[in-house]
Amino acid sequence: MAILVTGGLGYIGSHTAVELLSEGRDIVVIDDLSNSSALAADRIREITGKSFPFIEARLQDEETLNKLFSDYDIEAVIHFAGSKAVGESVKNPIKYYDNNIGSSLSLCRAMLKAGCKNIIFSSSATVYGSNNPSPYREDMPAGGCTNPYGETKLIIEQLLGDIVKSNPGFNATLLRYFNPIGAHPSGLIGEDPRGIPNNLLPYIAKVAVGQLPCLGVFGNDYQTPDGTGVRDYIHVVDLAKGHTAALNNMDGLKIYNLGTGKGYSVLEVLKAFEKACGKALPYEIKPRREGDLDAYWSDPGKAERELGWRAQKTLYDMCLDTWRWQKANPKGYEG
Ligand code: UDP
């Protein structure tokens, strides 16, 4: 029996692959390398001392997917594969609806055909939209997303909920991630965005390593203590462990936040990173980024009560591990 990890060479997928292998589980990875590197597979093997099959294919290649389900005995799928750049999703919605929803439909079709009845889905706090007060709780109404990326996450959540209803014995766990940052403490795997990063931590890391001149802080007039945006940052290794905890507790449709329950501002993150890398980093205040909310964070209590999972690492750990990865791999995997 093996766990199929879609998008298993990407940022969160690769860290989850490490946790699964370290727990002694067998995995099969499928990834189309559209936003990841095959070298991540070598690094996962290096960290864990374990090997696993890697299939380079798109999920919409249903022939390959059906063959995979017949070649391996897949007891559960952890579904990370998808496009994730919010700004790009606004410019190119068709790509996002096609890649994210199309691939999830193909995956679910293949699972049902093969009789595989367990899926864990990478969802996002963005499904809470802009009207819920923080801390976000799983029983709050989802919807009102501000971009196509978020809409695709919500639609896939609904799809999985409907499949659970129509297929007795089918289990789907939706994990709503807050802001994953950090890297494996080995410095061997981490986030490797192509081009200029959109997200805060990869951007700061590239300023720290001298590849970008200055961080732009998107707005300092929000309703927050220092005026900059507040988010619930979570160490990617804690997040990965949330998946292994979820795997042990599947039962119909389940929804869990994966966050720390604590928000930090852009300037607080920058200060923590400066401490981790031992130097001051230049920044300038820029206008707000369209679609950004002022502040949100999770209530992670449900995952703790039901899965026995809780994030352990501090913001400083997250920055230190990001810095270790960035320093050792200044140009990412291909560098
Ligand atoms: N941010 C920033 N400069 C950047 C990237 C992000 O000030 O170059 C801010 C952004 O406005 C938000 C926070 O950092 O308040 C986290 O943004 P990110 O894109 O990492 O994640 P999001 O919360 O938007 O998914």
Image: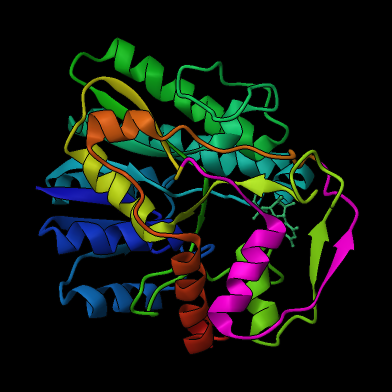
Q: Quadrant of ligand 1?
A: bottom right
**Picture quarter containing residue 238?**
bottom left
What span is in magenta?
261-290
Spot occupied by residue 171 in the image (x, y as percentages of width and height): 25, 25
**Picture quarter containing residue 161?**
top left
**Picture quarter containing residue 303?**
top left
Residue 118 visible, this orientation = no
Q: Which residue is rendered at x = 39% and y = 64% of the image?
A: 9
- Does residue 43 appear to the left or right of 211 in the view shown? left
Q: Which residue is rendered at x = 31% and y = 45% of the image?
A: 242
Q: Nearer the viewer, residue 141 or 320?
A: 320
Is residue 151 on the magenta stretch?
A: no
**In the rendered view, how is the structure colored?**
rainbow
Check the image and report above or below for 209 versus 63: below
Q: Which residue is rendered at x = 15% and y = 72% of the image?
A: 50
Spot occupied by residue 257 in the image (x, y as percentages of width and height): 43, 34
- Does residue 193 appear to the left or right of 70 in the view shown? right
Check the image and report above or below for 87 versus 197: above
Q: Which residue is rendered at x = 73% and y = 38% of the image?
A: 293
Extreme right residue here? 287
Q: Nearer the viewer, residue 284 or 203?
A: 284
Residue 64 visible, this orientation = yes
Is residue 267 on the magenta stretch?
A: yes
Spot occupied by residue 196 in the image (x, y as percentages of width and height): 72, 70
